[in-house]
Amino acid sequence: SYELTQPLSVSVALGQTARITCGGNNIGSKNVHWYQQKPGQAPVLVIYRDSNRPSGIPERFSGSNSGNTATLTISRAQAGDEADYYCQVWDSSSWVFGGGTKLTVL
Amino acid sequence: EVQLVQSGAEVKKPGESLKISCKGSGYSFTSYWIGWVRQMPGKGLEWMGIIYPGDSDTRYSPSFQGQVTISADKSISTAYLQWSSLKASDTAMYYCARLGGTIFGVASFDPWGQGTLVTVSS
């Protein structure tokens, strides 16, 4: 089965840029979606199809996908961006999530 | 506004049965797939299965096949997740989410329901 690998945690200073990676075999050939989950809340879609932002998601959130790594980039990080972030793809009739990355804003 | 509203928290004993629900509104319920996702305490997201309410076409993750049943009643725009015999290991938060299109390799899950916490304890 297809696996997605994310770092357990990423830290970023307030106002700086955070990058969260999602590794998978030839993931660049797939559509990657990213979800944000704050404590006690349901996940929210923040990036779809590699690099597209749903309405209401700040421009500070962006995504890229190439080769074996997809990346979620959060510019000018704010305290409110602290959350768990999950990448997700579809492969061989299954929806697969990465293990999740906890973003800490220092 | 597209919305999914799930049923309330449940506390059950091992061996009991359970059916939780997810009601869609603000869109054509029969035209979008609804997926179910498990989140065990302190853990990540796991896809369980998905249903197309228009014709009840249902797919299951191999990890959950035979463990749960997914169904839908399109007359009341509601999808269901049910267990016939709960185990303590079924304790988790369960989310439903709408798949934003019919091409699986392209569509994402949006929006999500608020979640239903299921606690199984003797």
Image (cartoon, coloured by chain):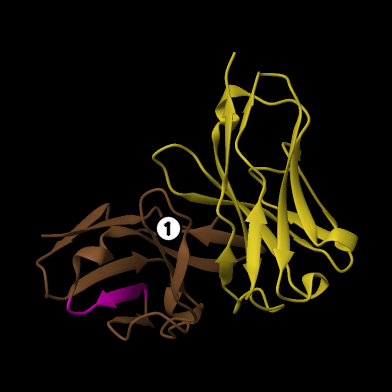
Local secondary structure at mark 1 = loop
Q: Nearer the viewer, residue B119 or A22?
A: B119
What subunit carries mark 1?
A
Q: Nearer the viewer, residue A57 or B65?
A: A57
Judge left or right: residue B35 versus residue B45: right
Quadrant where the C terminus of chain A sits is bottom left
Residue A2, visible in the rendered structure: no
Q: Nearer the viewer, residue B91 or A50?
A: B91
Residue at 12 percent of width and 75 percent of height? A15
Vertical placement of residue A9 versus B90, above or below: below
- Residue B60: within the magenta? no
Q: What residue occupies the far top of the structure in this picture?
A: B122
Residue at 63 percent of width and 43 percent of height? B63
Judge left or right: residue B47 versus residue A39: right
Residue B33 image position (x, y, % from top left): 73, 67
Residue at 27 percent of width and 77 percent of height? A73
Mark 1 belongs to which amino acid?
Answer: Gly
Residue A13 image position (x, y, % from top left): 9, 66
Magenta part of the chain: A68-76
Query: Callout 1: 10 Å neighbours few (<14), some, many (20+)?
Result: many
Vertical placement of residue B49 versus B117, above or below: below
According to the rendering, which colour does chain B have? Answer: yellow
Q: Which residue is mark 1?
A: A98
Vertical placement of residue A21 versus B102, above or below: above
Quadrant where the N terminus of chain A sits is bottom right
Residue B70 image position (x, y, % from top left): 77, 49
Can you tell which quarter of the image residue B73 is in? bottom right
Residue A52 image position (x, y, % from top left): 44, 86
- Among the chains pictured, the one given brown colouring is A
Judge left or right: residue A3 versus residue B13: left
Residue B22, visible in the rendered structure: yes
Can you tell which quarter of the image residue A7 is in? bottom left
